[in-house]
Image (cartoon, coloured by chain):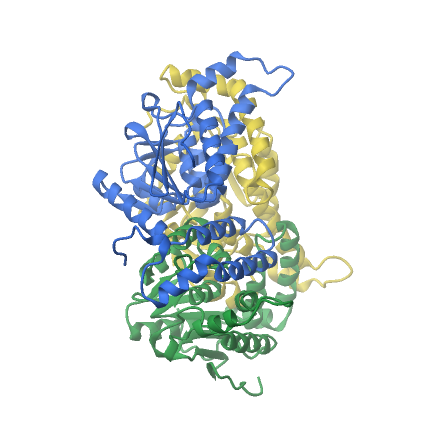
Chain colours: A yellow, B green, C blue
Amino acid sequence: MTALPQCDTLALQLDQGVLHITLNRPDSRNAMSLLMVQELRELIQLTATDDAVRALVLRGAGGHFCAGGDLRDMVTARGQKAGDGEDPFYTLNRAFGHLLLEVEQCPQTVVAVLEGAVMGGGFGLACVADISLTRADARFALPETSLGIPPAQIAPFVVRRIGLTQARRLALLGERFDGCEALSMGVAQFMAEDEESMEQQLGHILQRIRHCAPGASRVTKALLLRVGNEPLAGLLDDAAGDFARAIRGAEGQEGTTAFMQKRPPQWAKTDANDQ
Amino acid sequence: MTALPQCDTLALQLDQGVLHITLNRPDSRNAMSLLMVQELRELIQLTATDDAVRALVLRGAGGHFCAGGDLRDMVTARGQKAGDGEDPFYTLNRAFGHLLLEVEQCPQTVVAVLEGAVMGGGFGLACVADISLTRADARFALPETSLGIPPAQIAPFVVRRIGLTQARRLALLGERFDGCEALSMGVAQFMAEDEESMEQQLGHILQRIRHCAPGASRVTKALLLRVGNEPLAGLLDDAAGDFARAIRGAEGQEGTTAFMQKRPPQWAKTDANDQ
Amino acid sequence: MTALPQCDTLALQLDQGVLHITLNRPDSRNAMSLLMVQELRELIQLTATDDAVRALVLRGAGGHFCAGGDLRDMVTARGQKAGDGEDPFYTLNRAFGHLLLEVEQCPQTVVAVLEGAVMGGGFGLACVADISLTRADARFALPETSLGIPPAQIAPFVVRRIGLTQARRLALLGERFDGCEALSMGVAQFMAEDEESMEQQLGHILQRIRHCAPGASRVTKALLLRVGNEPLAGLLDDAAGDFARAIRGAEGQEGTTAFMQKRPPQWAKTDANDQ
């Protein structure tokens, strides 16, 4: 990445191969505006081809992750007629679904840091991260049905994340829940009681990501996301090809050599010590 | 619904948009007879088009939910020859699978109240409810294989409810388990220690259902059930259409207006106060 | 089975319809060599048609289940050129995926007894067992990405076993975990604190398997494995046929008769007493 793009709604920082993306509209608890969706989509696309970026960390400014869709966009869309073209509400909603799928599919390992409000679209974003780390006191919900609308783009990703049974409960009752419940349902895989523990755990997660080879991690992520969406036999054939290429490639040679020499591999060089 | 149908095996009561359905064969612990299957299927079909019914509550009379298939039907079927037509055992078994799918797909939010015996077909019924509330001391099992038969129509819904790993254990070992385990596996999402807590939690669940817009809940339920059964992109396209229609419709207008006016929406009017 | 085959890498014992298979390369913590894969595949194929074998128990010699792929095979494969034919690394890797699928699909109920190292391919094998019993202090991991290679044949089975969210964590962070975590994620369904409890629980599991009719268990297992891989309606049609055949067959007659006579069925005759 020659230079980080300028964004109105995001604050960006690149550090040791990790791109830290902060949703930066703290006045509206980082509500997901159409502009924010566009800026995130462009950023993900730009980053996808950049092998130097190994992980994305998504978090929110001002103590909240993301409170959901932006009400001002809704007001604007209502003011526009659904004329000959696409209904602006359709466009607005569908764009967010594209973002969710693009975050899910992006080659880097994506870490979401969840705190404060993680509502509606914010909850959807949490559901497509590879790794989600939540504060115990974060507040989650799918409140859409209580507002008279379906959690349209979000619900499918919630089902994929936590299964139909819990997704039904969240979507059809609209109940709030906290980080402990998010952990036990598998929305998040890590939980922190306070700010200090959160930073410590994030540091540990990033260290673990650096310990895994960048290329092998990309190949593995792509493989994991295909399971259940196509016949298994062809997937395993492709996977064997991935394996052969990887072990004959530079990473596979370095990885096995480092293992036999009992030293950390090159790609993990910022690791001080590791279990 | 102009009038509730007369049923031999079910007791029905309609209260504030909630249809309470009681499996009413307490002498056989509400064993699922062919007649009960027929009456339930007709009732579900009748209710499907009734917008005034927002939720179905399924429970059993006499302290048991449902002990499984009815043995007398089995004896009758054995007495009949599998002649030129369909084997009566095939018919009997397949009808129950149709019921399970129809309960799963019905537009209302379905709440199952589980207590006492929740065996075989009763367990299957628990697995297709949107919301299951169990007594801690309820007794669950898939005892079929120990009787020399497969849990044929039930097993697929168990896999969809709790995943292959736990379904394998239950079906291939035939072990009993209680409400605590049902909660931890995700058969149920709510658990009550006693009768009083059960009624209190059921009241809370129904209040939450009323808080969610009826139309948005139907659209959301249909959407949730499609996930994993078709390609995601088309599902998200349809969902964006659902969103646009909902937010421009009466519910969407009322829901967003009520939210901005900090008052409960019309459809939640029986709510006294809500979190 | 007229006679157990002679194997270099496996120790075999047939006892009361249970084939005990011990991965028997303790010097390399039962690393999964190409020869072991071949011997296991041939054994599974041979056993598949043997109705007298009702269960397979997979465990490792010397206190470890299986530490993963065999490094010597890797060295050999590297020495071979990927000439006109298939890359030896491809062959080596793909063969293991075939084994995993064949263990998963084999008609007997498969029990894995997990202790010590359950790494890489060993973890994959644990994920295809019907029943997994783990020592609390067993050590699990998917360390591949930290070696520069993808867990190619294994990852899909991990996703099917524990879902995408936890599979992502294990594969993209490469972290170790113990038997308690394996239990809570659903890798295993049973956990033992020590050797004595392990044997006791294994005895209980085998007793439960004997309590379930052999034919009905096979039909049920095949049914469970089809869920999610094909449309539900046709599966339920087939299942109703299975049901009718089973209940009219010898097992169905014996099972229902024994139930009414309050005695254990013939196939459970080694059961002393049972809950």
Check the image and report above or below for B149 versus A189.
below
Q: Percent x, y for residue B36?
A: 49, 76
At a point 43% along the width and 70% down the height, the residue shown is: B112
Q: Residue C64 versus residue A204: which sits nearer the camera?
A: C64
Side (left or right) of B194 relative to B36: left
Which of the pair C85/B232 is nearer the observer? C85
Q: Is residue B94 left or right of residue B23?
A: right
Q: Position of residue B173 (x, y in %)?
A: 37, 52
Asked whether, in this view, residue B55 is left or right of residue C20, the answer is right
Q: Which quadrant of the structure image shows residue A244?
A: top right
Whole-percent x, y for residue B12 in the image = 47, 83
Q: Decide: is B211 above or below C199.
A: below
For the C terminus of chain C, the image quarter is: bottom left
Res. A166 visible in picture: no
Between residues A244 and B244, which one lies in front from this camera angle?
A244
Q: In this picture, is C127 found above or below C65?
A: below
Q: Quadrant of residue B237?
A: bottom right
